[in-house]
Amino acid sequence: MWSFTKATILTLSSTYFLLTTFAFPNSDPLETQQTRDVNSLRARNIVSDSSAIQGSYDFIIVGGGLAGLVLASRLSEDSNHTVLVLEAGESGDANITQINTPADTYYDSLVGSEYDYAYQTAQQTGCSNRNISWPRGKVLGGSSAINGMYLVRPNEPEINAIHSINPNDTDEFWTWDSYYASMKKSETFGAPSADIAAEAGIQYNAASYGSSGPIHWSYPGETFNLVGNWTPSLATLGVPSNPDPASGDNSGAYITTSSINPSNWTRSYSRSGYIDPLPPRSNLDILPSATVTNIVWKSGTSGNLTATGVQWASSSTAAKQTVNANKEVILAAGTIGTAQLLQLSGVAAGVDVQLDLPGVGQRLQDHISGSLIYGTNAETAGDEHAAGVATAEFLSYINSATAYVNLTTLLGSDSASALISSAQAEIDSSASSLLPLGDSTVAAGYKAMYDTITNQFYSSNSGQIELLLSITSTSVLIQAAIQHPLSVGEMYITSDSVFNYPYLNPNYLVHDADLTILREGFKMARLISQASPISAYLTGETTPGSSVSTDDEWDTWIQGAVGTEYHPTGTCAMLPLELGGVVSPSLLVYGTSNVRVADASVYPFELSSHLGAPTYGLAEQASTIIRDYWNGVSTNPNATTTSSSSSSSSTSGSQESKNNGAFPTFAYGSRGIVCATIACLAGCMMVL
């Protein structure tokens, strides 16, 4: 009679997974991917029964979103460490087709569904006293499962500014060289076909991307003539085409990469990239539908607070359950959720204050955007959708034509200089009006951020406006979004329950410079519509139309029309404590011994990019920091040189990390499949 241990079962499961998933693939790529995704949940220690959860883990990750699943995958590479992920949202199984299909971002969106937190801001005085909708992903994968899939890197000066504003970043984790290596570690680049590249005008430098990471960076399988008219039209306005926007200078016009897996034209996101391909790991559990309600602190200690675990519940009416952390609690619940949980746990203002950390929830900021709308005589993706086209190539089409425009190009040299001088003169008054809390350290941090933007970013080639072309409806939209807002706000809890949404106030457009820059961005968007060659395909502006032409008319329209670009950040800023910072460069929450934050809340200012690409890099960097700490590695391997996409710190107890960052080897070739399968079979023989 055989006696099967958990290790035996896991080894057999690994063998079955390898054979069925890779050796005998289904003939239909989309069906194959969706079937793998559903089956992989059963094999991958993603559990639906909370009774399967152990009483303690080395690492508890709060939030199974973009960053949380990166951390789960990387930390569990060390077999001597146990990892638990608690995710408030569902697994995503019930809507896997919508998640996987890029075009459903527009035509069958999950925004507004149970996979969306559906936050709303407080009334915005700079936006005609409107409440602005803030969708955020509430599902395994977080917002990476429901977003627009843009993958745009930030600029090198922006990342180096994070390092400069944190003088205690002695390991240089937040220099461009180090951060760039971590971003590339997460990527596998896929070049467009020759036909797609020619029609869309796509330029790229493959060497600027990773080649063996979990997230696919690629282009749609279908495109349209309008897309190919984007970069030449911008060139007539002094915005040059950028053939290499991924290596540290993202300025100019180009067709950007998107998170598309070109092998089957599906969305590539943190769950499909970092979790689904894994063999079963006995040291990793992921529990959906589990909302963490508070951090549990060790009582009776002096000095830094120590987290002993967390409490969580499946709903607002369910009983709380406790799970203990042997080493760390890692917060990856996003810009809103992480700050909310810290406040609910007595960090900063809130419930039963344990630690006075006034920066938590402060400096909330976001990109704000809007659209000019035009009729067109050209075919759009919206036309094909209306006609019922449903090929995998068409369903991979998403918007990707973009441009980042610096202040001098946007305003002209004299007007740009005048705006910079005016903004710099308002630094003290802005700090007083935008930071009602009145804490001197938070004010000092805002001034440091303000000075960085006005003295460095405004005067550099960094984009102050992002311009986007959208053709997924039957009309053409040209969108504009401000990138480095001086307007900041705050978020704070409104009750002692995590199930009650916090107060969110980004203070959109309350700083005059922000309104000026956004107004000029929309003026440039209108100029694009009049520029050749794209003007030949546009038949008239329907929104806002010819009734808006003066600055006052533009301002009135802007304040009534704009909304989020879905990039909130700043509530747990990585800044020195004397600047109102919340986390150190090692991402440790000040005043605690074992609580870290690893998500977009730590950026001290907005980046001129979408948040996906930099946050994958941040999560990879966080994983390296944490693993190195607990495995006795004291130096940053990426600190002095930009390493290739396959670079990875060599960590004890980790075979995968010793494979030069490939993820995992067996997923990328028949030889790897055979070798891994043989190894698994050998393991079965040894255990049995």
Image: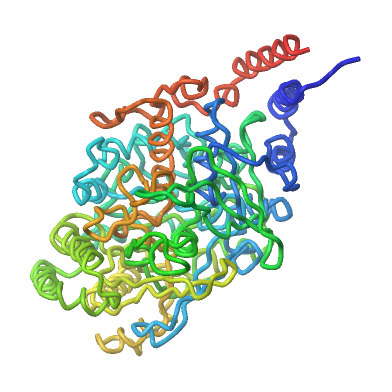
Nearest the camera: 458 or 297? 297
Q: Residue furthest right?
A: 1
* In this view, 328 is above or below 531: above
Which quadrant, please, contains the C terminus?
top right
Q: Residue 568 vs residue 158: left or right?
A: right
Tell me where residue 546 appears, x and y as whole percent.
35, 86
Tell me where residue 165 appears, x and y as whole percent.
20, 51
User: What colour scheme governs how the chains and residues are painted in the rendered image of this protein?
Assistant: rainbow
Q: In this orientation, does residue 610 appear?
A: yes
* In this view, 103 is above or below 644: below
Tell me where residue 43 appears, x and y as whole percent.
72, 34
Name the residue at 73% across, 43% down: 38
Q: In this orientation, does residue 470 appear?
A: no
Q: Residue 30 vs residue 2: left or right?
A: left
Q: Residue furthest front?
A: 300
User: Disc count in the image?
Assistant: 0
Residue 28 image-quadrant placement = top right
Nearest the camera: 348 or 130? 348
Name the residue at 40% across, 75% down: 505
Which quadrant, please, contains the N terminus?
top right
Tell me where residue 384 appears, x and y as whole percent.
61, 61
Nearest the camera: 429 or 274? 429
* In this view, 365 is above or below 101: below
Residue 248 image-quadrant placement = top left
